[in-house]
Image (tube, rainbow, N blue to C red):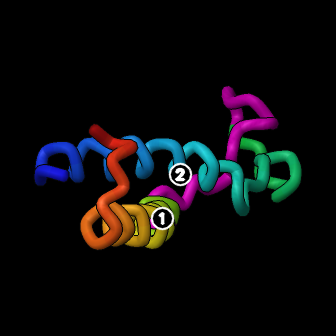
């Protein structure tokens, strides 16, 4: 696997993982009891994107590393 293909596969895994991680820990403004005027009560009270990006990066790295290892050392030709 070339470096460009490795990065492309990591990016796809990262985006899929991000969409899986986004709902974790979300509380609506109604649930937190602080509805700001002019916003939807179902809108998130705090999105915590920084934490979610870090978690996404760690999880996608944990998914990508074994795949890359298996490809390099066991020559799994599924990516070609």
Q: Is residue 72 left or right of residue 51?
A: left
Q: Who's the residue at 38% across and 67% down the image?
A: 70
Position of residue 69 measured from the top left corner of the image (x, y, whole percent): 33, 71
Please state which of residues 50 and 71 is positioned toward the viewer in this rendering.
71
**Residue 18 magenta-highlighted:** no
Q: Position of residue 41 (x, y in %)?
A: 80, 36
Which dot, 1 or 2, sits closer to the camera? 1
Q: Position of residue 38 (x, y in %)?
A: 67, 27
On whether residue 47 falls in the magenta region, the answer is: yes
**Main SS of the magenta segment?**
loop
Which secondary structure, mark 2?
A: helix
Identity of the residue drawn at 71% across and 38% down: 43
Secondary structure category for the residue under label 1: helix
Q: 50 or 61, which lies in front?
A: 61
Q: Residues within 10 Å of mark 1 (few under 14, many from 20)?
A: some
Q: Residue at x 25, y 42 (%)?
A: 8
Q: Residue at x 23, y 52 (%)?
A: 6
Give the crowd class for mark 2: few <14, some 14-19, many >=20 residues within 10 Å. many
In three-dimensional space, the C-alpha distance between marks 1 and 2, rounded to whole angstroms, equals 10 Å
Question: Where 68 falls versus 40 (above or below)?
Answer: below
Specify the segment rendered in magenta: 37-51
Q: Quadrant of the C terminus?
A: top left
Residue indicated by mark 2: 17
Judging depth in this view, the residue of 17 and 44 nearest the camera is 17
Pointer 1 and pointer 2: residues touching (CB < 8 Å)? yes
Going by the image, does 29 lie left or right of 62?
right
The residue indicated by pointer 1 is: 63
Q: Nearer the viewer, residue 57 or 78?
A: 78
């Amino acid at each position: 696997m070339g470096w460009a293909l490795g990065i492309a596969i990591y990016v796809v895994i990262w985006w899929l993982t991000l969409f899986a991680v986004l709902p974790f820990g979300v509380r609506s403004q109604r649930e937190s009891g602080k509805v700001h005027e002019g916003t939807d009560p179902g809108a998130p009270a705090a999105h915590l994107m920084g934490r979610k990006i870090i978690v996404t990066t760690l999880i996608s790295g944990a998914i990508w590393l074994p795949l890359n290892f298996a490809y390099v050392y066991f020559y799994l030709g599924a990516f070609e």
